[in-house]
Amino acid sequence: MTSLDMYKRPLRVERVALDVAKNAGVELFMARADEIHPLASGNKFYKLKPHFDYARKNGIEQLLSFGGAFSNHIHALALMANEYDFQSMGIIRGEAEYAKNPTLTAARNAGMTLEFVTRKNYKLRDDENYLTALGKRFPQALIIPEGGSSPLAVAGCTELSKDINAQHKSDILTIASGTGASFAGLVCGLEETQQAIGYAVLKDQSLEERIASFIAAENAEATHFNRYSIVQADYGGYAKFDDTHLVFILDWLEQTGILLDPIYTSKMCRRLVEQIVACEFARGTSITMVHSGGLQGWFGMQDNVMKLAGESSWHRIQSYLQDK
């Protein structure tokens, strides 16, 4: 039986050389969680490992979760389940033709069973009656919420803060936030003098309430609720991608040598740069950004990149991905 930690690499924190930050007197660092595990990069490892540990401890052999057709979570769940001898199933929003895309092809090749549902039915993924019925259909499965967003994931992501601080302690830790569990865990793992910023990549009015609920459930100290903020960074909506955003990603790659994913970390970094330019951080502030992985998402965007910026831009991205 393979250990879940067998392929985990030490988290590396590196200085980021960005002109706008240097001019503003802000020290930038990046926690390279994208490098931490070959199958579940970024926050996915921290969120999923507690679910695998729970399943193994309780003799559960199947893991079931929800996601869109290009879901990083579904991709990571499938690959980890295959490696660690679990069955996996994904409830996928959209049409069956999506099964041919790079993300779901990789999931299927890893042995994941896919069940496609309409967008209307997908909205039931948190409904108590729906989950009860799903549990009856799959009585041997551990049902994991969309994005792995659960109290187990929050507990796992407190370890992310600890791993970062073991390498470098900044004034502020930042991460892109989708469902909120990773950010809540990051907050719960803060040291006393630290702050955290979560960059919301979705238009989700319930996000702040959900994050507060996660933090409370983790039995965090009351002071944690005064040490974080949420900044909107959706840039038109989840998964919206245009030439302006691509130019930012390519410029970041040119300056730093780090490729960002198109949906999460790139939006966090773009909004953070805007804040630095607007002098929202005092000179001398040190900030560590979490690279939450998701680079596999680029494989489904080749046509989009070539249309927006030409073949040479895609080759730059492709070359980086191949080197990794």
Image (cartoon, helix red, strand yellow):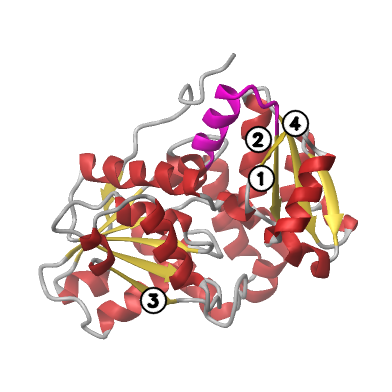
**What is the distance, in whole Å, between disc 1 and disc 4 at their CAs?**
21 Å
Magenta stretch encompasses residue 161: no
Give the number of the disc on residue 75. Answer: 1
Q: CA distance from mark 3 to mark 4?
A: 40 Å
Total labels: the figure holds 4
Q: Is residue 199 above or below residue 111?
A: below
In this view, the residue in front, 202 or 109, is 202
Which residue in the structure is indicated by mark 3?
231
Amino acid beneath label 3: Val
Q: Earlier in the sequence, mark 1 or mark 3?
A: 1
Query: Start and end of the magenta stretch?
Result: 48-62
**Residue that numbered label 4 is attached to:** 140
Of marks 2 and 3, which one's residue comes earlier in the chain?
2
Q: Which residue is mark 2?
A: 79
Q: Residue at x 62, y 57 (%)?
A: 298
Cα gap from disc 2 to disc 4, whole angstroms: 20 Å
Q: Which amino acid does the dot numbered 4 rest on?
A: Gln
Percent across and percent down for residue 159 are: 34, 41
Q: For the residues marked 1 and 3, what is the alpha-carbon distance in whole angstroms?
A: 27 Å
**71 in relation to 76, above or below:** below
User: Disc 2 and disc 3: Cα gap in Å?
Assistant: 32 Å
Q: Name the residue: 68% across, 62% down.
A: 301
Residue 245 visible, this angle: yes
